[in-house]
Amino acid sequence: MIGRDERTDQLAALQEEVTQLRTAMASHAVIDQAIGVVISVGGLRPEQGWDVLREVSQHTNIKLREVARCLVHWPSSGQLPPDVRRALTAAVARARDSAATGENDAMSGRPVH
């Protein structure tokens, strides 16, 4: 038989897990939207959009979900932090250059277009 304290601990653990899952789901949706913004603005493919988003996060030392949030709000606000703007411009240019030079898609081995 499970004691009252053990049930309380289990309930607390489950509540924490639910909170973490909800946060992850919300972050995932924002990240997907940000990839869409990057693809649209940069004229890139979805795989390139993900790579650009990740690169911006790494080069600015800003968490990916925060970069995503900035990018999602950018079209309506017209504001983008200067460091994110610089990193985004550079990452999009690199993605376009790699596509133009025909670097291979890592998944298929086909040239990136």
Image: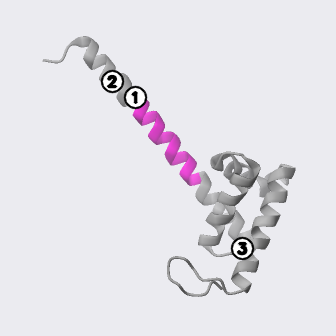
Q: Position of residue 105 (x, y in %)?
A: 57, 80
Q: Position of residue 28 (x, y in %)?
A: 54, 52
Between the residue at mark 2 and the residue at mark 1, the CA separation in whole angstroms equals 6 Å
State the residue position of label 1: 15
Secondary structure of residue under mark 1: helix
Q: Amino acid at mark 2?
A: Leu
Q: Earlier in the sequence, mark 3 or mark 1?
A: 1
Q: Residues within 10 Å of mark 3 (few under 14, many from 20)?
A: many
Q: Residues within 10 Å of mark 1 (few under 14, many from 20)?
A: few
State the predominant SS element of the stretch in magenta.
Answer: helix
Q: What label does residue 95 carry, if any? A: 3
The answer to which quarter of the image holds residue 31 is bottom right
Between the residue at mark 3 and the residue at mark 1, the CA separation in whole angstroms equals 41 Å
Task: Identify the residue at image location x=32%, y=19%.
Answer: 9
Between the residue at mark 2 and the residue at mark 3, the CA separation in whole angstroms equals 47 Å
The answer to which quarter of the image holds residue 96 is bottom right
Task: Identify the residue at image location x=43%, y=29%.
Answer: 16
Task: Identify the residue at image location x=76%, y=69%.
Answer: 92
Disc 2 vs disc 1: Cβ atoms closer than 8 Å?
yes
Secondary structure of residue under mark 3: helix
Secondary structure of residue under mark 2: helix
State the residue position of label 2: 11
Label 2 or label 3, whichever lies nearer to me, is 3
Q: Amino acid at mark 3?
A: Ala
